[in-house]
Amino acid sequence: MLGKHGGPPLIVRQRTSGLRTALLIAGVLIGVLALYVTYELGRYDAGYDRQAVAQQRTELEVQIEHLEKADREMRTRLAELDTFRVGRAHEQAEVARAMGDLQAQVARQSQELAFYRGVVAQGAASVGVKIEQLRITAGGRPATYVVHMSLVRSGRADTPVTGGVQMSLDGTGAEGARTLDLGTLTAGRQRQLRYNFRYLESFDQELSVPPSFKPERLNVEVSSGRRDVAPLSQTFLWNVEASP
C-alpha cells in the first residue's frame, strides 16, 4: 500500500508464529495426558490395585529389615563363638555344635531374605491373582508329598480369571543339582494345573519325589490366560509339615 503523501509502501505482517507455537505445545500436552489416562485405565481394568501393591511392598520391606537385623545378630554371635572356641579348646565340641546350629539358622535367614527381596521386586498383582497359602505335607505313600495351595483374586472380581500353574522342584541328587518339572513329579499325568475362578481356588497336588533326590525349593509360576499379562513366579523353601 502507498502512504498518503507518496512515501514508501507500508507492509502489514500477520504475527501468528507465537499463536502456532502455543497451540502446538497445548496439543502435545493434551496428547501426553490422554496417553497417561489411557495407560492408567488399562491397568485399572486389568485388576491392578496401586494401593494394595504399595501396602504389600511396605509390609515386605519391614519384614526384610527384620530379617536383616536377625541375620546381623546371628553373624555377630557366630563370630563371638568362633573366638570363644579358639580360647577354650576343652569346650570345642559344644561350641562346634552351637556354631553348626547358628550356621544353619544364618542359611535359612539368608534364603528367606533373598526370597522376600525377590517378591518385592516383582509385580505380584500383574496376573490378577496371588498365592494366598502354600503348605507341603507328607503323602500316603513313601517318597510322596502333597502341595496344598490356594489362589485368590488380587483385584476386582467382575469376571472369572483363568490361566495355568506350573511347578518345579530344585534339589540335589546322586548326579548333583537338578530341577524336576511337574510332569516328572507326577509320572507324566500332569503337565500344568488349570484355574478358572472368581474369588478363590484351592489345589491339593500330589508329587512323587525320587528316593535319592533331596528337595530344597519349590518353584511356582502362575500364568494368566491373557497373553499381554506377565506370569507371577514365587519360590518356597521345601518345608514338610506334619500331616493333620
Image: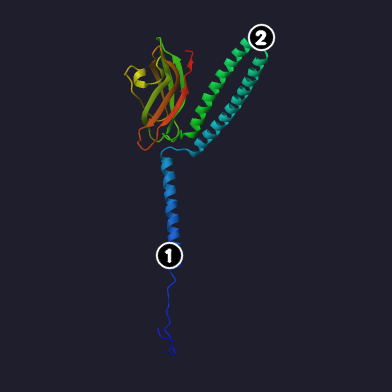
Q: Position of residue 60 (x, y in %)?
A: 54, 31
The kind of residue tagged 2 is His
**Residue located at (45% from left, 55% from top):** 29
Picture quadrant where residue 129 is located: top left
Q: Secondary structure at mark 1?
A: helix
Residue 244 in sight in this render: no
Q: Which is closer to the viewer, label 2 or label 1? A: 2
Tag count: 2
Q: Position of residue 51 (x, y in %)?
A: 51, 38
Which residue bears the numbered disc 1?
Answer: 20
Q: Closest to the observer: 186 or 76?
A: 76
**Which numbered dot is residue 218?**
none
Residue projecting furthest to the bottom = 5
**Residue located at (38% from left, 13% from top):** 210
Lateral position of residue 58 relative to residue 23, left or right: right
**Which numbered dot is residue 90?**
2
The kind of residue tagged 1 is Arg
Q: Is residue 120 above or below residue 216?
A: below
Earlier residue among tags 2 and 1: 1
**Residue located at (43% from left, 60% from top):** 24
